[in-house]
Image (tube, coloured by chain):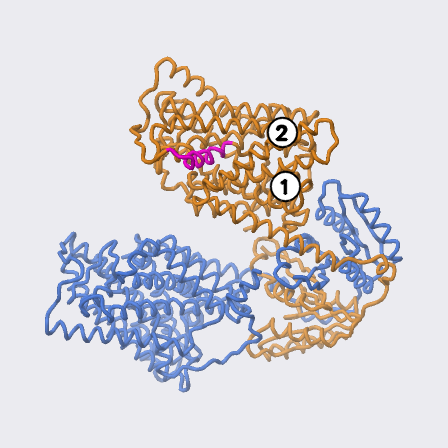
Chain colours: A orange, B blue
Amino acid sequence: MLKKFLDILIGQPLANEQSGSEKYNVPFGLAVMASDAVSSVAYAAQEVLLVLIPAIGMLSYEYLGYISIAIIVLLFVLTISYTQIIKEYPHGGGAYIVAKENIGVNAGLVAGAALLLDYILTVAVSASAGVAAVISIPAFSGLYTHKVEMVIGLIIILTILNLRGVGESSRIFSIPTYLFIFSMLFMIVYGLIKYAIYGAPAPMLHDNLKMGGQIGLFLILRAFSSGCSALTGIEAVSNAVPNFKEPSQKNAIKVMCLLTGTIFFIFGGTSILARFYHAVYIENTKVTVLAQIAYGVFGGYNFMFYVIQFTTAIILLMACNTAFTGFPMLMSVMARDGYMPRSFSTRGKRLSYSNGIVFLTVIACVLTLIFKASTDALINLYSVGVFISFTLAQAGMVIHWQKSDAPGRTKGKIINGFGSIMTLVTAGVIMGGKFIEGAWVVVILIPIIAFMMMSIKKHYNKVADGLRTTEEEIINCDLGKHFDHVIVVPISSLNKATLGALKYARSITPDVIALNVSPNKEYIDKLKGRWEELDTDILLVSKYSPYRAIITPLVEYIGVISKAADQNEKITVILPQFMTSGWAGQFLHNHTGLILRESLLKYDNIVVAMYPYHLDVK
Amino acid sequence: MLKKFLDILIGQPLANEQSGSEKYNVPFGLAVMASDAVSSVAYAAQEVLLVLIPAIGMLSYEYLGYISIAIIVLLFVLTISYTQIIKEYPHGGGAYIVAKENIGVNAGLVAGAALLLDYILTVAVSASAGVAAVISIPAFSGLYTHKVEMVIGLIIILTILNLRGVGESSRIFSIPTYLFIFSMLFMIVYGLIKYAIYGAPAPMLHDNLKMGGQIGLFLILRAFSSGCSALTGIEAVSNAVPNFKEPSQKNAIKVMCLLTGTIFFIFGGTSILARFYHAVYIENTKVTVLAQIAYGVFGGYNFMFYVIQFTTAIILLMACNTAFTGFPMLMSVMARDGYMPRSFSTRGKRLSYSNGIVFLTVIACVLTLIFKASTDALINLYSVGVFISFTLAQAGMVIHWQKSDAPGRTKGKIINGFGSIMTLVTAGVIMGGKFIEGAWVVVILIPIIAFMMMSIKKHYNKVADGLRTTEEEIINCDLGKHFDHVIVVPISSLNKATLGALKYARSITPDVIALNVSPNKEYIDKLKGRWEELDTDILLVSKYSPYRAIITPLVEYIGVISKAADQNEKITVILPQFMTSGWAGQFLHNHTGLILRESLLKYDNIVVAMYPYHLDVK
């Protein structure tokens, strides 16, 4: 039943890998790449205001302007810097790969850990902001108390879709992205014109803002840190170069530039509108800044207000979804390199990296619960990881140029050097500005995760060393040298499954022992009687178990045989395994077999075989 | 690491069953049996007042008296009735066994389902009431908002202790039980004398109680239903007869009578004190009635007040603990009968029924979350199940006497007949009185669970039928008839583990195929080169996998072999299995093997064998 249920939910297993999905042209590529990067404008300006307003009141709007300019400068620096990576890494250069190849393994692992955390936070932040957009609509404001449940529900729906293997490369996803971009552009242009003609309307929320503190460098830096979340996702293009149509690098650069332009216009535009229309955002404000702007620009809860809210919610959902592609993919790359458990490198039945997806879901849900689905709280953890990986990628590029002898290497070194310094400073600012509010969590987690990955690699290396055979060992290896076999078949009764297993055993060696443990003496006598009717040379050993225990006596007896065996003897234990159709098999059978298997594999000279017996029972 | 952590938490595996723990004498037996039954006085009177006060104000105290008398009458009827079961079931007669043996399987399953629900509710109710007792202490009242977390924390601690195998039979548990009983008796005697001399003190909470409704039969019945929770746990003695010292039945009856006396005094006493000291309990009252009484009797927050609160909390915890013994035990009995998955009948490493314990924990925690750890809300579900099982047990006894020809059978029939009618009426009253408030949940769940148990049994029966062999089949069975063997060993490289597996395979049959799938053509050539150095007659099949998939091509190729095999051929697939010491093995290895195993066991003629290779790697 569970299996059937999962089949309906996740879909029938796919038969084989169908690689080579459609490649991106420029407009399609922009749509795919845009969601993560562009969606962050939904909360970036708002989070800046959250820091500023309680301290400096009306002055906040002026400083929002300065901070936006600084962020936009950073945006252009990053764009130019990442263009270099696209040129040099035609097969895709994520921070993990660039840092590992150029700086070294440790830098790569730190970048990888930072990216993994970033993906997890993308899920939690985007889903929370998406639900906030919907709740900003008056009709849905009653859902505010169920925000956490809604965010977790959303994440779970995305999980199911991704386990089914939706991916992000479906052309249908272009539509909402462009809808969002164009409705935002429309709002910005319309809002600016309206302001130029009519001036500011009455703001949606009270704007009697008082200065509660002072302007200070630390305040500005904290506000800037919050705003930097607008830049997350910008690196996506450089990872995806091989997915673009030929000439792939050129197309990727085109998309990168268009993306930067889009962010510039939308982030810059909303920052100006927030100022003109006096959007207010302090603790416990339940209406997002974007909703307040839309209300002001379009003059009420009208059609365009709803369009802005819904397209915002959808693009945030899609941003969330990019993490569901990126996280399992990065996990699988690291797992193949041996830094993550190998199980993350295998695809599930639907060809998605199911383990990575489920892992992402669990952690993102835990984060959502801890931070009560508050974008304001989660944002304090965000960006640190992103800028650490930015810095490592740029620094890796500097070293890459150092080693290179390509014509543009000096220019490249200067660009990436400048980029890496800028992002390093930003990372420092974010860490310092948000440390107490939550960035410390990330600062502690990154080295722990990196260390864990190194330990995993070390373990795999040790195992590989332990298993390795020399040329000499292979030449001297005589596979024909025979083992002697003793086979033990644990049986509960003489049923069709056990008879099959005994027949199989007897065809390997005459040294077969049928082993029975029973708490019932009469039953043992009865079994012995039936055994005689079998007329076989297989030995039946029947043990009486006074305390009803079955497994312990079985393991003990087999352990004795194992110890008595000489070096060339292998003991094979054959466990009849019921295979029933339907849901029941999972829960109702083979429990004893499972425990026996785990217990017996601890012995060096015991091979455990499962003899399936198929029964057509629902 | 996880394993180590669990080892520390749950303890090292126990080597073997050490049955036959100490048998109970009368005082020890009373201590063990008392916690569940006696602890319910901590909330029974309070829950009666919760129903009455909002409706009839000051009149509540008078009706509390009438209701308490009715409950005490029921207590004596039950005691006499259960004495009969103790006499007739020297090996222990729970409602499940008595109903199943005398009335029939369906009645037994209904009783069993009712008991299982009752155990789950005992955990949720007792833990919630225990935390409520602690929170009634002013110093801890701030914890009120964390009640749910505290209750779940408590349940988890009990789970761990029980997975370690604490059990309830440790003599140390007698101390807090007697402490509770004697401090309660002291409070009652002291409170009555104080009242006789000084009259009622000013009550702890306002007692300006107004009538908000009317006295009516339905109100009285609802209040009575709540009070009936005082009688839960009374049946425990009859289950435990064989655990008593000889003469076990006589000792059990003695304990049963002492238990009844204790409940009579404590429940009756607290009901009277609640009246004299005007304890008030309405919705959202954060101080328990027992705490209010203790405050009134001892005149403030003094030493004795704390003694009452803490001993109450501890005895409630112990009541909770009895369910952790009873539930898994009943599950194991039903699992052995085939009505529950067999996995519930096997003991864990520490000889506790771990599956049952974990199952109980999960459901009790879910209940606690749903009902926000409110004793008031949970109580509405409680008692229905208990009284259904009481009724079925008594009715079973009536039929038992019907069939019997023992001298006391007429007397027995009358006693149990009267008992069963009384409990049936009570069950009906509880169901009717509390139906909307929550009893409907139980009324729906009991038949669903009973039906589920029947389905499980049916499934096991079908499997048994499918496996059964006739006398004739056994006589004609020729175990010596040989299978022909083809062995497939999937290998990734020529390492020590795969060489071992190949050697093992070759010693069974010359028809061995080493099967390799690799996404790397160069690697395949290298492997073929090394293979030649081996100089073996084993066939190497190397398949190139363009899309990195490993498992699918392996399964496909083996599937082809399976289909091509003729009837007397068995294909054995040998999977080398790494066994590493330490925590890593669980997570870092054998993932491919696991998936292969599940996929291959679906074929009728494929036996899957695991060849362990032990590596001493941390």
Residue B305, located in which quarter of the rendered image?
A: bottom left
In depth, the one of B217 and A222 nearer the eye is A222
Judge whether A605 appears above or below B379 on screen: below
Name the foreground residue: A422 vs A380.
A422
Q: Which residues are magenta?
A: A215-230
Label drawn at residue A135: none
The mark nearer the N terminus, 2 or 1, is: 1
Predominant secondary structure, magenta span: helix
What residue is drawn where x is 16% and y is 52%?
B213
Give percent across and percent down for residue B499.
79, 60
Indicate yes or no whether the magenta region holds residue A219. yes
Write the residue at 36% across / 83% down.
B26
Residue B591 counted in the magenta span: no
Q: Quadrant of the N terminus of chain B?
A: bottom right
Q: In terms of image quadrants, where is residue A207?
A: top left
Return the residue nearer the eye: B111 or A380. A380
Q: Are marks 2 and 1 on the same chain?
A: yes
Q: Write down the chain letter for disc 1.
A: A
Q: In the rendering, which numbered label is found on residue A96?
A: 1
**CA neighbours of label 1 inside 10 A, class few (<14), some (14 to 19), many (20+):** many
Residue B570's spot in the image, x, y percent?
77, 59
The residue type indicated by label 1 comes to: Tyr
Image spot of residue B583 (x, y percent): 61, 61
The residues tagged by marks 2 and 1 sit, at their Cα atoms, a distance apart of 20 Å
Locate the C terminus of chain B and report the quarter of the image it occupies: bottom right
Give the left or right position of residue A172, taking residue B423 as reference. right
Q: Classify residue A140 as left or right of residue B165.
A: left
